[in-house]
Image (cartoon, rainbow, N blue to C red):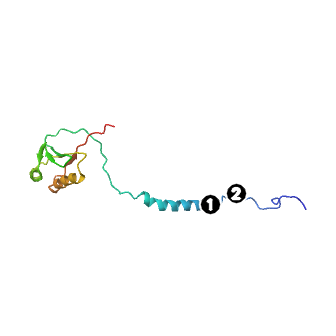
Amino acid sequence: MSMSSPFEEQNDPLLNDINMTPFIDVMLVLLIVFMITLPVVNHAVKVDLPKASVEKMVQDTQAIDLAISANGDLHWNKEALTESQFFARLDALAAQTTVPDIRLFADRAVEYGRVAWVMTNAQQRGLTKIDFVLQPDKS
């Protein structure tokens, strides 16, 4: 009985290949995990938001200042309006040959539906040049 190593009798060269099976198993598991979680992560509504910075307002004597107060009251160049007067002024403005811009001052507390209603009525009459007036962020 000789005490020799079992490796001494092997005449085969050593194999230096990397065993790819565990690597492939891990990659397949990661692929499955990402395939399952990706729809959950991207479940947000896709909206293409405009990118803009607040610029200093240019004084335009032709522009109409349309303000919507917090309770939804309309003001045309600082003059309070009823809805029928608002419609009449929009019609008169749309009939002009050169349509001025409308600068919309909407209070932060006003309901979105009221702002959308004003914009829709202006758009229906062909008044599409509407600027939103904001205060610059101080932070």
The structure residue drawn at horizontal position 56% and vertical position 60%, both measured from the top left corner, is: 27
What is the x, y in percent for residue 115? Answer: 21, 51
In the displayed structure, would residue 23 be above or below residue 98?
below
The structure residue drawn at horizontal position 15% and vertical position 48%, both measured from the top left corner, is: 74
In the displayed structure, would residue 53 be above or below residue 18?
above
In the image, 62 versus 64, the foreground residue is 64
Look at the image and tell me in which quarter the C terminus lies: top left
Q: In this rendering, would 17 be left or right of 136?
A: right
Label 2 or label 1, whichever comes before in sequence order: 2
Determine crowd level at label 1: few under 14, some 14-19, many 20+ residues with C-alpha closer than 10 A: few
Residue 24 figure quarter: bottom right
Look at label 2 and name its amino acid: Asn
Secondary structure type for disc 1: helix
Q: Residue furthest right?
A: 1
What is the x, y in percent for residue 94? Answer: 11, 52
Say which residue label 2 marks.
16
Q: In this rendering, would 42 be left or right of 107?
A: right
Q: Residue furthest front?
A: 71
The structure residue drawn at horizontal position 12% and vertical position 52%, both measured from the top left corner, is: 83
Secondary structure type for disc 2: loop
Kindly indicate whether the residue at mark 1 contacts the one at mark 2 (C-beta within 8 angstroms). Answer: no
What is the x, y in percent for residue 78? Answer: 13, 42
Residues at marks 2 and 1, CA–CA distance in whole angstroms: 16 Å
Look at label 1 and name its amino acid: Pro
In the image, 2 versus 11, the foreground residue is 2
Determine crowd level at label 2: few under 14, some 14-19, many 20+ residues with C-alpha closer than 10 A: few
Disc 2 or disc 1, which is closer to the eye?
1
In the image, 77 versus 22, the foreground residue is 77
Residue 81 tag number: none
Say which residue label 1 marks.
22
What is the x, y in percent for residue 1? Answer: 91, 62
So how many labels did they put on this image? 2
